[in-house]
Structure formats: structure tokens, C-alpha cells
Image (cartoon, helix red, strand yellow):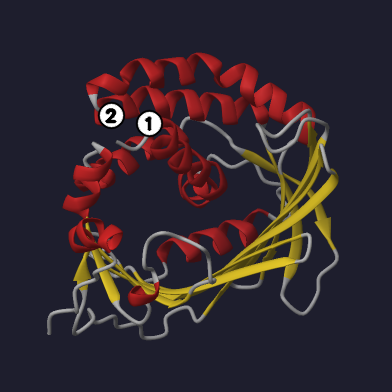
Amino acid sequence: MVNAKLIIGVIVLLAVIGGGVYLVQTGKISLDKEDETKIEQGFLHLLEAETLKAEGVLNIDIAAQTEAGLQTALITLGFSDSVNKKDIENVQSEGVINLSVSSEGMNLSASLEDKVIGSDFYLKVISLPTLPLAVDLESLKGQWIKISSQELTEESGYDISRFTEMLEELKIVLSSESIFNVKETLEKDEIGDHYLIALDKTAVKEIMKGFLEKSKAYVPEEQQAEVEEMIQNIPSAVDEFWAKTGGIELEVWIDNELRKLKWENEFQVDSLGQVSQGETSIGLSLEIMFSEFGEPVEVAPPEAFISLEDILTNIFSGMIKQPEE
């Protein structure tokens, strides 16, 4: 069963980063009056756009002290997705995901295609690194794998079909707090008007606490105690994160639309589990570009695919079924 921290933690992270979209609509974002209209309209257009394209890169740069000395690693996740959300109950998207890991002369990379059609998720492996594994992954290449919401529910113990309800709960929590302020108007460039926005620490605490409280209704009974522990630890965890990172500041670029988001931060931790025994430096950078607002996006399911059940059943025997037409 998937740990509650993983399920809820991911959703909370998305809520903190993406919550501003909803908050502008409800008038809960504190904006400098001079820039209020442009920023508000940029976020509103992103929220209301029926179709758009999002392209981004996340970099995680790690420098850790180990028994062998200083070790470095760079993890890069790139994505490009075209989205159709005309029907919010049947969102469609398709795109590409690229992952690479570089460390001490070792370079590994993988590429995937993805499709989302309503409650069904499809994934195709384009390329994988060569690894000395006991299971046969090569036979997965070029095949579409279908993962349904029912299968995700069975694997996680969390009712994926209630995700829309959970988002509605999130909206209620978000509407009660002002999550960020415009700190500075930066120099305009070819992308658009440029602003620096800072998240409010107190608001982040209250939003996370409120959302986790409401999310308990959607978490299996055996994980309730774990969620309650997370709620109790939120104030100290957020304080510690702010102390290490100096908080979260985002750069945004806006013309008539929100065109770009950028976040960069670097912080130190005393150790990184069993990976490092000394001080570890972690650098994070995230950039997301938005384009092709209103352009047609039609996503069709693959003509042939294999199910997640087939993968889980057969992968360890090295026998991947051929897809059904």
C-alpha cells in the first residue's frame, strides 16, 4: 500500500505551487495595486484556458559528503504536455517525459510518452538505461501500458475516483488564506512583464493543516494516525524548511497570459539518510513555460496496450504479454 505521506505530500506540494491560480479567482491574493490587473488576468487565463501546452524542467543538484569524499549528482526531469480541459470531468493530455541522472562519470537517462484520457493513464517507454537487473525491462519498450483509476485505487488503498471531491475541499481551504505577495516588479523582457512573488509562511502552514484535516476523510482508516502525526508536525516542519531555504520565492512572466514560472533555491541539510554522513548541499530549480492557449488538442487512446495487471504479473518472470489489438 502506498504510504499516506506520499499521496498527500504530493497533493499538498501541488497545492502550494498551483494554489495561486485559484486564489486570484477568489480575490485572496495580495497584490501590489499597480500590477494587480495584469497578474490577476494572467492567472485567470491559465485557469480558464480550455487548452494549453506546458513545458518544464526540474533540476536537483546534490553535493554530499560521503566516506569516499565529496560526491555530486544531478537529476533532471523534463516534460512537455498538451492539455485539453474543456470537460473538467474528462481532462485529456499527451506529452513526453525525460529523466536523466548524472553522477561521478555515470550517466543514465530514460524517455517516456504519456496520455491521460479521463480516469485512464497510458505510459509508453521510449528508452531506458541499461542496468544489471534480474527482471526484463527491454520488452516494455515501445508498448503502451494502461493504468486505470481502479487499479491505482487497488494499489494505493486511496479512492482515486474521489480526487475531484478532494480538490473541492482544497479550494475551500485555499479561499481562506492569502498565500503570496508581489515582492518586486522586475525588468520586462521579450517574454512579458516580470514579477517576483513570495509565499507567506503562515498561510502555507494554515493551508497545509486545513487540507490535511479535510483529507482524512479520503484516507484509509489504518493511515489516519499517520496523517494526524503529519498535521501535528506541520508548524515545526515549515519553520525548519523556511530556516534552511529562506522561504519560497517565484518569478512569473506575464503578457496577456501567464507565460513562465521559475523557482530556484539552494539549502544545506546535515545528512541525506544513508547516502551521506556529512553536510549535504541541495540545489533546486524549476521552470515551466505555458503556450498554445486555445490551440486544438485531441487525444486518442492507443490502439494497442497492455494493462498494469499484466505488467505486475509477468514482469518478474521476464514474460511481457504482447499487446491486444
Q: Is residue 231 above or below residue 180?
A: above
- At horizontal 20% and vertical 47% (from top left) the residue drawn is 161
Image mark for residue 219:
2
Name the residue nearer the viewer: 224 or 163.
224
Name the residue nearer the viewer: 97 or 207.
97
Q: Toward which corner of the image does residue 255 lie, by quadrant?
A: bottom right
Circle 1 Cα neighbour tier, 10 Å, few/some/many (<14 / 14–19 / ≥20): many
Q: Disc 2 vs disc 1: Cβ atoms closer than 8 Å?
A: yes
Q: Where is residue 229? Give x, y as percent.
A: 45, 15
Q: Where is residue 275? Give x, y as percent.
A: 69, 38
Q: Tell me the distance, in whole angstroms, between the alpha carbons under discs 2 and 1.
A: 7 Å
**Is disc 2 placed on a helix, strand or loop?**
loop
Q: Where is residue 208? Give x, y as percent.
A: 50, 29
- The kind of residue on which mark 1 rests is Ala
Q: Is residue 149 above or below residue 230?
A: below
Compared across the picture, whether 212 is left or right of 67 comes to left
Q: Earlier in the sequence, mark 2 or mark 1?
A: 1
Name the residue nearer the viewer: 97 or 15.
97
Quadrant of the frame with the N terminus: top left
Q: Toward which corner of the image does residue 190 lie, by quadrant?
A: bottom right
